Structure formats: C-alpha cells, structure tokens
Amino acid sequence: MSGDQRRHRHGQRGHAGRRPAPRKQGPRKPPAHDPARRAAFDTLRAVTERDAYANLVLPDLLRQRRVTGRDAALATELTYGTTRATGLLDAVLAKCVDRGLGSVDAVALDALRLGAYQLLRTRIPRHAAVASTVDLVREDSGSRLAGFVNAVLRRVSEKDEQQWLDELAADTASDPLGQLALRTSHPRWIARAFAEALGDTGDELRAALEADDARPAVHLLAKPGQVSAEELAAITGGDVAPYSPYGVHLPPGGGDLAESEVLAEGLAAVQDEGSQLVAVAATNAPLSGGGDERWLDLCAGPGGKTTVLGCLAQVSGATVDAVEVAEHRAKLVREATDDLPVAVHVADGRDPGLDGGYDRVLVDAPCSGLGALRRRPEARWRKQPGDIAELTRLQSELLASAYRLVRPGGVVTYVVCSPHLAETEGIIGEAARRADAEVLDARELFPGVPALGDGPYVQLWPHRHGTDAMFCAVTRKR
C-alpha cells in the first residue's frame, strides 16, 4: 500500500499528515441541535449535489423546519456569505490541504467552506466555528472525515482574512486584475468583463465587484392599476423606490414574504427595480405611425416583466402575447398574469408561429445572468467564458425573430441581465444594422435615473443604482 493510500484510509489528517493526539475513549455527548448551521450546510449540499440555487432552497428549508429569528438570520448570512466567497475560501483551503481540492470528499469540502467563512468573515469565536462544523460532518459522515475537517480548519484559523489575502496576493503579484478578482471573490474572467463594460480597472471596478458581495435589498412591484407604490410602502413598512414609479424597497429583515397578504392577494410581486424600469421603458418608447394595441413578450418566463406589460396594457387598452418555450415556465407566466390581457403561447421565440404586425416587442433574452450575481451568488462559479458564445447566437436569433414580427414604426426593446459587452452592445448593434432599425436613446425612457453614461443604451449597475445590472436597448423598425 502506498503512503497516499495509507493517509486516505487513516482519515486524511491535514496538511502535514500528522496523526492527531490520542483521545480518551468513552461515550461522547451528542452535539447540540444547531438549526442555523444545519440549514446552511444542507443548502450548500443542495447547491453542490443538484446545482440548486441557494436563494430558492434556503427559504423553503427555513419554513419547513420553522427556523426563525436570529437562527434564520444566521443561516442566511452563512449560506449566502459562503456561496459568494467560494473562490477566496477555496484559495485559502488549498493552502491548508496537502492535495488538490478536487480530490477532497464533497461533504467535507462544503463543510470546510462553511467553517472557513465563519473563521474569516464573521465574529463567531474560533472554537465555535470549528467545533460546530466538525459536528455537522460527524453527524453526516462519521469521525474520520470529521477529524480531517477539524485539522484543516485549525490551519485556516492560524491567520485572519487579511493575512491570508496578503499571502495569496504574493502569488499573483504581476496580475492586479487577478488580485482584485480574488479579493472580491470573482472568477477573473468575470472581473475582466465588468472592467470592459465600465471602461475602468480601478475604483469603480472595485465598487462594482464589491456590490456583488453585499446582500441585496428586497424590491417589490406595486402592480400598476391595482395598488400604488405609496400604498404598498405604507402596507409593508418599506420605502418608495427612487426610480421606478411602481417600486418599493423593503427594509432589511422585512419579514417572511411567504406570509405577505399583498403578495397573496396578487397586488404586488417580488421584482428587482431594474427589471421594472426596463419593462416600463419597453411600453413608453415612441412609436412611428399606426396604433399601439398589440404587444409581444418573446421570452416571457417566468413572467415578471410580462406582469408589468400586462398591467400597463390593461390600463392602456392593449393586449399582450407572451411566448415561452418551456411548459413549466409558461405555467408560471399564466399564474403571474391571471386576469390580465395576456395570452400565453408555448413556443420557441425564434419561430413562434404568430402573425406579425406587433407594435411593441420585448426581447428579454436568456443570458449569462452576470448582472444578478448578488442574488444568485453561486452562479459566478458555475458560469464559464465558453457559455457566452452559445448565448449570443440565441440572442441574435431571437432579435431577428422580433424584427420579423414587429411592424414598420414599431419598437423592439432588447434586455439582458448582464453587463458583458458580447451580450449587450455587440448583439444589438449588429442585429439592428441587419434589420435596418433605428437605435433610439434609451436614456430618455429612464427619467430621474443618474449615471447612465453616453448612451444610446442603458446599463444599470448595483453600485450605481442599487438594481441588478440590467442592460436595455430600444430600437424602432424603419
């Protein structure tokens, strides 16, 4: 048997492979129930095992297990904090394990990330962070793996976050962008994409990346024609949004939205203010000739922007056709737009089989989602640079379909939740040229919103506007 095999069989004893000091044998008191860390750990396991999204898994776990108050707050901090900081945590852990992290047991690696986050980015006492994490592993996988986790976390605890960052930075001294990506826990290629979109590699790039590391506020949509933003703010204890006429920002810890009566009654919906702004812009862009009665949402699922279109169409007397290729997402659109003048079609937006002549077409295209990393923090570690090429082909094909379906003088609004130039300016510029469409100045459709740049497109940013990084281009068919 080789030395590596012996180390594996005897419990993976940490960086130096030293056997831990023998302990007195005897019964061990079972670990105290720790609902917060258990919920966080189980969410991390779901993210790893099923490619689940933490922001969907964790709220359900907390409700099912009736975890509330301080425990719920701790579970939320540990879950989202760990998923956001995975890149940095893995870099630290790699320094404390004598083999590649790819060979570490998946349960142990999730536990190590959870424990390292507590050690480096919270005020939780060192012994509590280590012991609680080891207990989770022991419950799930037994003592051998727990001993390995214990040894590694003790190595992590020998330095604080800044000391680890300084040590790691020495390995990338000739790569300032790589250092910034590491410090803000982003893959380097995403940091580069942000830098290219901003035209900045200094303070503003740092602010944009750091904004992804902050837990976002919850934004509500006051459905137009059903409740005003002022009324919704009064009901929920929130604040009227600074830019969207239909938006409300909830205070931190604003309660369990699942128990909200205004959501249950269909008066409001959870929706980022940036999504509201681009949907409203699509309904306000100036047309040329003809009427303003037929609107089309070419990529409707899961229905958030379709809801805004439907509410505003109901007020103005228009109708909306909503196209969604996946049946389960089309069902969500139907549920979201019940009692609104919206007809849902299960079809491919590239060839939906609809009669043309629409006055307005919204193309809220599938994209990388790099503009919403603060809401889906694990997504930054799932995306790859190679994903962009396939997405841009789809985006181009959807825009070509939109221009076939819109009437002369009608408006096509192109939206993605990404600042990546290949998905934004690169796509719409070429698509508009091929369709001989006029590019309008979208900034005029975002009244009161500052720092919109030179136009004609609009790129929203979390660090500038407090919204997701939504991109909006408005074009009119000649």
Image (cartoon, grey):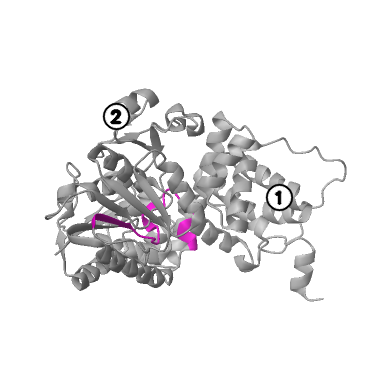
Q: Is residue 21 above or below residue 424?
A: above
Q: 316 or 34, which lies in front?
A: 316
Residue 346 place in picture, x, y as percent:
44, 57
| Residue that label 1 marks | 137
Residue at figure coordinates x 60%, y 60% from the top left: 96
Name, please, the residue furthest toward the bottom: 2
Residue at figure coordinates x 14%, y 56% from the top left: 441
Q: CA distance from mark 1 to mark 2?
A: 49 Å
Q: Label 2 sits on what residue type? A: Ser
Instruction: Residue 262: name its quadrant.
Output: top left
Left or right of 346? Residue 291 is: left
Name, please, the residue furthest toward the left: 289
Asked whether the viewer can see residue 457, the reply is no
Mark 1 vs mark 2: which is more N-terminal? 1
Q: Is residue 448 above or below residue 373?
A: above
Q: 213 or 402, which lies in front?
A: 402
| Residue that label 2 marks | 228
Asked whether the viewer can see residue 134, the reply is yes
User: Mark 1 near mark 2, Cβ–Cβ under 8 Å?
Assistant: no
Classify the position of the N terminus by image quarter.
bottom right
Instruction: Residue 363: name its quadrant.
Output: bottom left
Tell me the number on the disc at residue 316: none
The residues colored magenta run 358-382
Residue 337 place in picture, x, y as percent:
40, 42
